[in-house]
Amino acid sequence: MKTSTETDCIPGMRRSSREGRYAERVLVGVDDVGEEERIVIWIERRSGAVWAVGRVVNPQLRDSDETRPEDVVFEGFELEDALARANDTLEDDVSVLEGDGLPADAKPFTRKEVIPLLERWFFNR
């Protein structure tokens, strides 16, 4: 049985876990057996003014787009800390891809990217 927090305004539609995401990067690499692998890293804002950074490999292969506890690499109250952790995570994955000889061009996460979305949320609620 679904609760009201699991559905969108359209009956039968599940709410997306992406609703709170303020920035996202997708890297494409190759796994150990040569299959394409997608790595998604994001910054989201959660209730209680908590910033979270997540990282997941091959989210398209999951039954649900809901974030799992093991996907979260950071939670805290400071945006600067979230940006730093997201960029460290992104840099680690880019280094691995480059080490494998694959192109990995990903822009760093920036405050300039996140603040307009935060302001829109704050002033439109």
Image (cartoon, helix red, strand yellow):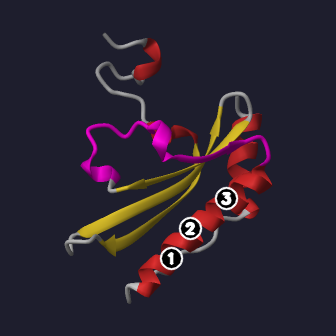
Considering only order in the chain, which callout, 1 or 3, is on the residue closer to the N terminus? 3
Question: Looking at this view, is 104 or 33 the one in front?
Answer: 33
Q: Dot 3: few (<14), some (14–19), or many (≥20) neighbours within 10 Å?
A: many
Q: Dot 1: few (<14), some (14–19), or many (≥20) neighbours within 10 Å?
A: many
- Is 14 situated above or below 95? above
- Is 54 situated above or below 104? above
Q: Amino acid at mark 2?
A: Leu
Q: Are marks 1 and 2 in contact (CB under 8 Å)?
A: yes
Mark pair 1, 2: CA separation: 6 Å
- Is 82 situated above or below 90? above
Task: Please give the label number shown on residue 85.
Answer: 3
Q: Amino acid at mark 3?
A: Arg
Mark pair 2, 3: CA separation: 9 Å
Q: Are marks 2 and 3 in contact (CB under 8 Å)?
A: no
Considering only order in the chain, which callout, 3 or 2, is on the residue closer to the N terminus? 3
Q: Position of residue 11 (x, y in %)?
A: 32, 18
Looking at the rendered structure, the secondary structure element under dot 1 is: helix
Question: Looking at this view, is 24 or 30 the one in front?
Answer: 30
- The furthest residue to the bottom: 101
Magenta range is 59-78
The residue positioned 79% from the left and 56% from the top of the image is 80
Asked if residue 70 lies in the magenta stretch, the reply is yes
Q: How many marks?
A: 3
> In the rendered image, which quarter contains the N terminus?
top left
Name which quarter of the figure residue 12 lies in: top left
Task: Please give the label number shown on residue 79.
Answer: none
What residue would you read off at disc 2? Answer: 90
Q: Position of residue 74 (x, y in %)?
A: 63, 47
Task: Please give the label number shown on residue 94.
Answer: 1
Q: Is residue 34 left or right of residue 11?
A: left
> In the rendered image, which quarter contains the C terminus?
top right
Q: Position of residue 14 (x, y in %)?
A: 36, 27
